């Protein structure tokens, strides 16, 4: 397409491979994501976007070392193994685990003795990130991967996350970085380089390349690996995760690394490798932001990600009480499938009070105590006393699936007293 060799194509592919963690927040966090995207898909996208920037570095340097005319193939592979995998990857993982663990213990100790105020407590993660970046830059190791590993080690027991979840500090920081990225990227787009005959770059070539990359970059592979990927439970989830892998700040970061490495030793690299990297990567990021930004609002309308549930009801008669009992079924019982138990009307108020408010992360229900039939009730239409046989017992339930309350009309059990003559119905 651009008359480049395989090594240069590998260099461009390594820059465009990582999933952007900032742009992925649109389908990972927020009210829409929590209500419509299954938690396992959100966790998979978050983990992938966080670790891709660090683990994409070996493939980037593999292409750079192969392009270096001063290196033979054997020397390039050897340096790639001991310098990138051992020194940059493994060392940064070890440092990240140690720093994250020590920081968690020290912060918890300081909080237990009331040695840290609330403002410093919330900003601790930012200071920790800056500290890690500074240390890893001094020793020239992989600071991005180290920050990711340190963050997981730091929040391993979820204590810091639980302490700061009500402050909304993380959401504000994500929004600020998101807006900053779009402003910065808008200022560096090389519009004039999108049509450069000397580099065999034309708008139609860039458009065809962007379409092929967005369709083939991850969607087929993620779909084919659905059966062996524990994070995805059906093809709908894998299709969604395969499509929403935007290209963003990680590609800019890798492209800057390529330019720095080539400019440090310009005599060892072909000039075309440096000239062609920036316009192609910039257009791929522009296409990803545009296409994924357009398709995301469509999900707000269609809601095609959420595993849809269907309900059916049964009518049963017990002790002279007709019960409309709803069951919530799912195509994926392991995630959303819940069969709601029916509470007999003969239960005591103390038992109902004991059940009130109990819930867990997957299923929960709230049962209100039965309304005593000794109290009078009035018809809301004509303000006249209603018949005692028509008064519901006041049984209600709120269903919680994947930590999101789901209240629907067909998920409520309402018990009515019926005459004994109809008990054989």
Image (cartoon, rainbow, N blue to C red):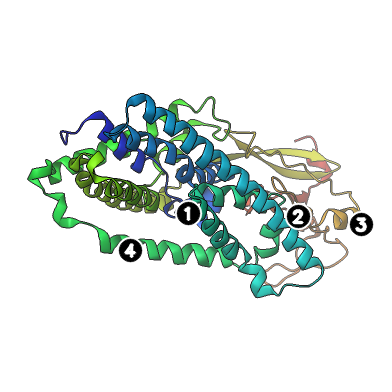
Q: Secondary structure at mark 2?
A: loop
Nearer to us of marks 1 and 3 is: 1
Q: Residues within 10 Å of mark 3 (few under 14, many from 20)?
A: few
Q: Residue at x 17, y 56 (%)?
A: 191
Give the side of residue 184 with respect to residue 327, left or right.
Answer: left
Residue at the disc numbered 4: 184
Residue 137: percent from left, percent from top: 49, 54
Nearer the N terminus, badge 4 or badge 1? Answer: 1
Dot 4 and dot 1 residues touching (CB under 8 Å): no
Residue at the disc numbered 2: 366
Residue sitting nearer the eye, 425 or 394: 394
How far separated are the C-alphas under marks 1 and 2?
32 Å
Residue 98: percent from left, percent from top: 67, 49
Nearer to us of marks 4 and 1 is: 4
Dot 2 and dot 4 residues touching (CB under 8 Å): no
Residue at the disc numbered 1: 25
If the image is split into quadrants, where does the C terminus sit? top right
Residue sitting nearer the eye, 292 or 250: 250
């Amino acid at each position: 397409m651009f008359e480049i060799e395989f090594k240069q194509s590998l260099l461009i592919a390594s820059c465009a491979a990582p999933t952007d963690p900032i742009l992925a927040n649109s389908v990972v966090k927020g009210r829409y994501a929590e209500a419509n995207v299954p938690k396992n898909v959100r966790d998979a996208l978050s983990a992938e976007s966080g670790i891709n920037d660090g683990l994409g570095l070996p493939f980037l340097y593999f292409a750079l070392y192969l392009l270096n005319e001063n290196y033979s193939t054997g020397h390039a592979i050897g340096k790639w193994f001991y310098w990138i995998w051992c020194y940059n990857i493994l060392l940064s993982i070890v440092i990240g685990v140690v720093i994250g663990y020590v920081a968690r213990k020290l912060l918890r100790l300081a909080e237990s003795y009331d040695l840290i105020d609330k403002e410093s407590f919330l900003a601790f993660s930012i200071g920790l990130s800056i500290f890690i970046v500074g240390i890893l830059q001094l020793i020239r190791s992989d600071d991005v991967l180290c920050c990711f590993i340190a963050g997981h080690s730091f929040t391993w027991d979820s204590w810091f996350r639980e302490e700061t979840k009500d402050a909304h500090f993380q959401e504000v920081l994500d929004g600020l970085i998101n807006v900053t990225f779009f402003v910065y990227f808008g200022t560096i787009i090389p519009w004039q380089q999108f049509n450069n005959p000397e580099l065999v770059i034309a708008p139609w070539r860039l458009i065809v390349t962007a379409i092929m990359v967005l369709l083939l970059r991850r969607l087929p592979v993620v779909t084919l690996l659905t059966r062996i990927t524990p994070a995805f439970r059906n093809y709908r989830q894998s299709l969604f995760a395969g499509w929403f892998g935007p290209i963003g700040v990680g590609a800019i970061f890798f492209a800057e690394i390529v330019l720095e490495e080539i400019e440090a030793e310009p005599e060892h690299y072909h000039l075309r490798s440096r000239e062609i990297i920036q316009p192609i990567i910039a257009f791929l990021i522009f296409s990803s932001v545009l296409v994924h930004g357009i398709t995301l609002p469509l999900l707000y309308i269609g809601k095609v990600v959420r595993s849809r549930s269907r309900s059916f009801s049964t009518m049963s008669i017990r002790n002279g009480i007709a019960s409309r009992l709803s069951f919530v079924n799912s195509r994926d019982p392991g995630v959303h499938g819940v069969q709601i138990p029916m509470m007999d009307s003969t239960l005591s108020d103390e038992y109902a009070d004991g059940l009130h408010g109990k819930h867990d992360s997957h299923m929960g229900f709230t049962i209100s105590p039965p309304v005593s039939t000794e109290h009078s009730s009035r018809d809301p239409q004509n303000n006249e006393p209603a018949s005692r046989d028509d008064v519901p017992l006041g049984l209600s339930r709120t269903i919680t699936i994947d930590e999101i309350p789901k209240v629907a009309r067909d998920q409520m059990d309402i018990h009515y007293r019926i005459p004994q003559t109809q008990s054989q119905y």
